[in-house]
Amino acid sequence: RVDPFHQRIRRLARKFNWPRLFWSRLFGDRLLFHSPLTLSSAFSGLGTAEIAAEAISAYVPKGSLGVPFAVGQACDLAKASQRILSLNVGVTAVATDLLFFWDPDFRAALLEGKRNFDQTRLLMWSNLDKLGSPFVCARTGRRVELDLGNLHCGGSPCTDFSSAGQRRGLAGPTTVVMLTWVCLVLRHLPLVVVHENVVQFPFNLLCELLGTQYEGTCATIEPSDFGWPVAR
């Protein structure tokens, strides 16, 4: 008979199968053995992905991983998050609003008027030449080229899908930001993309948007998996 603790460990092992696939495929490409594995993030918040990356790097000797692990660029709209990310000396540059990557005139046109999801997607996909890569770093004020590195973590806004929000789904205002993020991922093609959101988010749609460039796998993580008495 398996005790509850080991049952939880086994359940977590099944949910976190994607890192095992990631590492096996990474090490399967010998060209990556001498290249740095650089993490970037969007919708970075307080820099959880960066903190996790630095903790892993400090705990696991780089020699045993086979590749160096470094923190790269981060991006968040909130001023408080930008200040906190700027204090992390490992973060190479801090971007602000993803919509600023669009040409100003196109961005204004994108935000005005009412369109459904398909219309918004078609408008963006037809104007990718108006999507740039340079941005002004919130820390230094210098112009920097966007670099999503090898491993990119992004948790697009959940407010339109969360049960605690207005539940407008793809008709909500955050769709424009999510699609912009997808456009940037498809342009820079990091080796691995980790996307975090609520369970109501349409994961299959994200796989469709990323097309044949990525193979998607989904895991639902709950606080109770780690022994925390919280239902979320």
Image: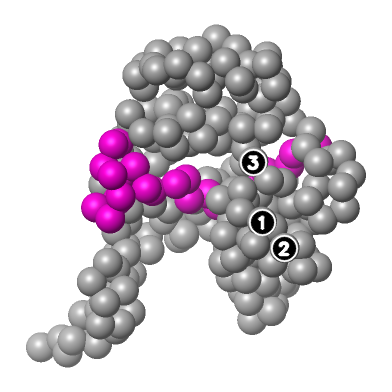
The amino acid on which the numbered mark 2 sits, given as a three-letter code, is Arg
Q: Which amino acid does label 3 sit on?
A: Asp
Q: Is residue 227 left or right of residue 145?
A: left
Q: Which of 62 and 44 is in front in this view?
A: 44
Left or right relative to 198: residue 107: right
What x and y, as percent, mark residue 128?
A: 62, 16
Residue extending farthest to the front is: 113
* Residue 173 drawn above or below residue 196: above
Contact check, label 2 and label 1, Cβ < 8 Å: yes
Location of residue 142 (image quadrant): top right
Going 33% across and 31% down the picture, which residue do you hit?
A: 170
The figure's colour scheme reads: one colour
The spot of residue 138 in percent (x, y) is: 78, 51
Q: Mark 1 or 3 closer to N-term?
A: 1
Tell me if residue 10 can be seen: no
Q: Which residue is drawn at 74% across and 31% down?
A: 133
Q: Mark 3 points at which residue?
A: 97
- CA distance separating discs 3 and 2: 14 Å
In front: 94, or 108? 108
Which residue range is magenta in the image? Answer: 145-169
- Residue type at numbered disc 1: Lys
Q: In the rendered image, which residue does mark 1 sit on? A: 79
How far separated are the C-alphas under marks 1 and 3? 10 Å
Taking the view exactly as shown, the residue that stands out farthest to the top is 126
Q: Which residue in the protein does label 2 denote?
A: 83
